[in-house]
Amino acid sequence: MADTRRAPAEVVIARRFRGPPDSANGGYACGVVGCGLHGPARARLNAPPPLDTAMVLRHPDMTSAELVLDDKVIGRAERTDATWAVPGPVDYDRAVSAARGFPWYENHPFPTCFVCGPEREEGDGLRIHPGALPERSIVAAPWTPAASVCDASGRVQAEIVWAALDCPSWFGILASEEAVRYALLGELTARIIERPVQDGRCVIVGWASGRDGRKLYGGTAIYSEVGALLASSTATWVELKDAAYAKKPVP
């Protein structure tokens, strides 16, 4: 029987793709591990992925992948046939209005986060800033992908789509809780139907789906401006014990 494993490859996550100042954005790191599996995948992070550090991406078989540093598995992904419900689309102008209520324009714990950091410049970070839609118990934000996150075909790179599917679920959780301690992404399951196109206006929605102790559950969906579902995810966030952030009211 032929050996179907792929050769290991060196991977370096550049500082541009940070979440906290010294580690990768969780969704981006999950995408680095999971997007090569060519289908819906579940990725789990075991440790904060370091920046500007050579790691090894290996595939034990055709349905799984591991990101390894010095024999320590930083993250692992596997194909999945899991399904989940997704809220319907939001009108683009309504998403623009909702984003004005983004709760972390000020006092963001990681203001240079690649996905949601308000201090990132246009074309550098994604600048996805979800605000609450109280009438639907979700959050929403507009997003127009820049050329810098697209490949030669003019579509958003797959690992960037994974990144965009990360933070909005957190803000969906934040909008549903009276007070919640800060949390870090532990697991992300993503399905990409069609990658967004460069300069194509999108709407991203995020929502909460429950909690179990310190585990917080949510999801994210990316829609085209006309309401076509492009990608969605479910996420597990792990609440930290030593940093509480009360929910800010939405104007």
Image (tube, grey):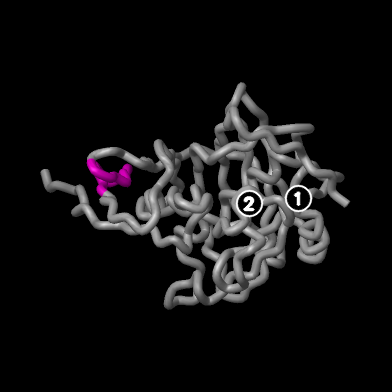
Mark 1 burial class by Cα count in 10 Å: few <14, some 14-19, many 20+ = many
**In the shown orientation, is residue 241 left or right of residue 248?**
left
Q: Secondary structure at mark 2?
A: strand
| Residue 80 seen in the current view | yes
243, 229: nearer the viewer: 243
Q: Which quadrant of the structure image shows residue 217?
A: top right
Q: CA distance from mark 1 to mark 2?
A: 19 Å
Q: Is residue 63 left or right of residue 210?
A: left
Q: From where the camera sits, is residue 89 visible? A: no
Q: Quadrant of residue 230?
A: bottom right
Q: State the residue at coordinates (55%, 59%).
A: 114
In percent of width and height, residue 89 lies at: 73, 55
Find residue 103 and name its label. Answer: 1
User: Which structural element holds mark 1?
Assistant: loop
Label 2 CA crowd tier, 10 Å (few <14, some 14–19, many 20+): many
- Magenta residues span 58-70
Q: Nearer the viewer, residue 217 or 244?
A: 244
Q: What secondary structure characterizes most of the magenta part?
A: strand
Residue 43: x, y in percent?
A: 43, 42
Q: Is residue 92 left or right of residue 233?
A: right
Residue 15, given in percent of the width and then of the height, sits at: 44, 61
Which residue is depicted at the point 44% across and 48% down? 30
**Position of 102 relative to 96 (above/below):** above
Residue drawn at x 57%, y 65% as measured from the top left: 125
Q: Amino acid at mark 2?
A: Ala
Q: Amino acid at mark 1?
A: Pro
Is residue 60 covered in magenta? yes
- Where does the N terminus fall, quadrant-wise? top left
